[in-house]
Amino acid sequence: MQEADVLLQVRTAELKDAQEYLSTSDAVSYADVQRMVENLNSKIFQTAAQVTDEFLPKLARAVYKYSHEDNPILVQVLVQAYLVDRAAWVINAWSLPIDPAYQTILTEVHAKIFVAENQAVSARWRTLTKRHLTLLADGIDRYIPALCGVLFRGLLDILVTSGVPMAVGAIEEKARATFGDEFATIARQVLELQKVIGQDVTSSEFQVLCSKHDDQFLAEFMQDIDDGGARAKEDTRTREGLPIMCTTELGLQRRGKRAGVKGEKDVEERSVMLKAKVAMPSLVEDFKSQAKAGDQMH
């Protein structure tokens, strides 16, 4: 009888472990994930605008050759694009620090598991892998200073390349003193999103969308930031397939699988919860035209 009780306890524990492994209950909702991406986009937008306001008097002439200094948009686009690109790089990573070869291997393995197994199994493999890789790396807090360093180096490159007539060391000192808190907030939001998407959601797979320079414009996944501006009346389809300049706000895609009908294979489902905001090369041409018109008026 005692042996039977022990066996029952063992089998009960095994069943509990199996149920936990195959569970698709999420620690956060889809709406929470979307809200986190939107909040990060908003913070990046605000910080890029503040950087532009701080350095605009010197940057405006260097970047657009304006005879006036009241349009910071192109500078802001440059800063946003860099911060968004680095954010996506970290959020979609399997582990920190990021080793490109390591990321490629894990991405390929997960893709095969996603195709071969049901959603619960592939998602649990992903969450356990990312969770234990993070534990091996002593958690995310230690990476905030390192990520801030990456962000500041990129910002410094933009400011120097744009022609700010200050010593490089002086630019960096001013940027760090002025925007240290903002960059730390961005870094924390990025790392928290990396954890939530990688470890806290099992009913679906989330990926932030961030296209590179010269990638094709795809209206299904992207929105032109100039849709409400100079090209507001154009049909979005006229831009389909054209190369983009950069991404200024992250998008969000959800992917999952549902059981097939009557023993058929599982059916993959995809949905774009947020379209990535992108700038097209035409934006630069529009500003050049505005600058020329402005100079002719003076």
Image: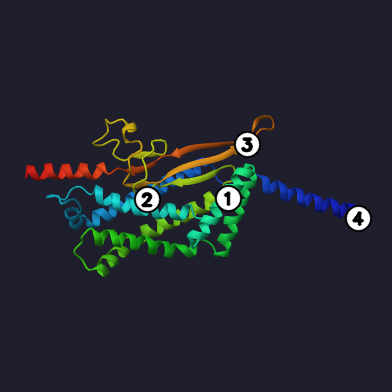
Mark 4 vs mark 1, CA separation in Å: 43 Å
Of callouts 2 and 3, the N-terminal one? 2
User: Does 288 sit left or right of 225 as displayed?
Assistant: left
- 219 or 21, which is in the foreground? 219
Task: Name the front one of labels 2 and 1.
Answer: 1
Q: Tell me the SS state at disc 4.
A: helix
Q: Give the image location of residue 262, x and y in percent.
A: 69, 29
User: Does 218 sit left or right of 280 as displayed?
Assistant: right
Task: Give the amino acid at mark 4.
Answer: Gln
Residue at which label 4 appears: 2
Mark 2 nearby-residue class (10 Å; few <14, some 14–19, many ≥20) = some
Residue at which label 2 appears: 43
Q: Which residue is drawn at 46% across and 38% down?
A: 272
Mark 4 vs mark 2, CA separation in Å: 61 Å
What number is the disc on residue 148?
A: none
Q: Tell me the SS state at disc 1.
A: helix
Task: Give the amino acid at mark 3.
Answer: Asp
Mark 4 nearby-residue class (10 Å; few <14, some 14–19, many ≥20) = few
Task: Give the amino acid at mark 2.
Answer: Lys
Residue 93 visible (yes or no): yes
Residue at which label 1 appears: 110
Residue at which label 3 appears: 266
Of callouts 2 and 1, the N-terminal one? 2
Classify residue 186 by image quadrant: bottom left
Mark 3 nearby-residue class (10 Å; few <14, some 14–19, many ≥20) = some
Q: Give the image location of residue 292, x and y in percent.
A: 12, 44
Residue located farthest toward the right when viewing the structure as drawn: 1
Of callouts 1 and 3, the N-terminal one? 1
- 266 or 226, which is in the foreground? 266
Q: Tell me the SS state at disc 2.
A: helix
**Residue 283, placed above or below residue 127:** above
Classify residue 225 by image quadrant: top left
